[in-house]
Image (cartoon, rainbow, N blue to C red):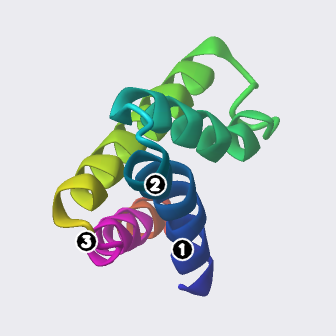
Amino acid sequence: SFSLIGMELFFRYFLFLRPIEKNNLPPSLAYIASTVLFGLPFLTNPIFNSNPAMLFGAVYYIAMQSLIACVLIKYTKSIIPAFAFSLAISILISIIIGR
């Protein structure tokens, strides 16, 4: 999906990999910035704020998806593996919820 390409370019390249390579930002700080900004739209959704279990699940999901995507892009220096991972997760979620 085109939105996944945009998300990966913005959150993983512009907010994670580029600051590490160009500005010598520590990877942990780049990961935190990328993850927090990646998670804000999800965490402001009333569905995820409906109860503590949903909120915890959303935070865990966002942190783990972001961590794996950041590790993929950091070690491969390519956005393609992170995009493929995000696409696989999106397809899996669509199958699970039946959309």
Q: Check disc 2 and report its element: helix, strand or loop.
A: helix
Q: Position of residue 44 (x, y in %)?
A: 80, 35
Judging depth in this view, the residue of 94 and 37 nearest the camera is 37
Query: In this picture, which residue range is highlighted in magenta?
Result: 78-91
Q: Comparing marks 3 and 2, which lies closer to the viewer?
A: 2
Of 82 and 22, nearer the camera is 22
The residue lying furthest to the front in this view is: 23
Q: Main secondary structure of the magenta part?
A: helix
Q: Position of residue 64 (x, y in %)?
A: 35, 37
* Residue 33 lies in the magenta stretch: no
Q: Which residue is mark 2?
A: 22
On screen, residue 99 above or below 36 = below
Rendered residue at 75%/25% (across/down): 50
Three-letter amino acid code of the residue under disc 3 = Pro
Near mark 3 (Cα within 10 A), the count class, few <14, some 14-19 or many ≥20, is some
Q: Are marks 1 and 2 in contact (CB under 8 Å)?
A: no
In the rendering, which numbered label is found on residue 81? Answer: 3
Q: Residue at x 43, y 60 (%)?
A: 93
16 and 19: which one is in front?
19
Quarter of the image holding residue 54? Answer: top right
Q: CA distance from mark 1 to mark 2?
A: 24 Å
Residue on which disc 1 sits? 4
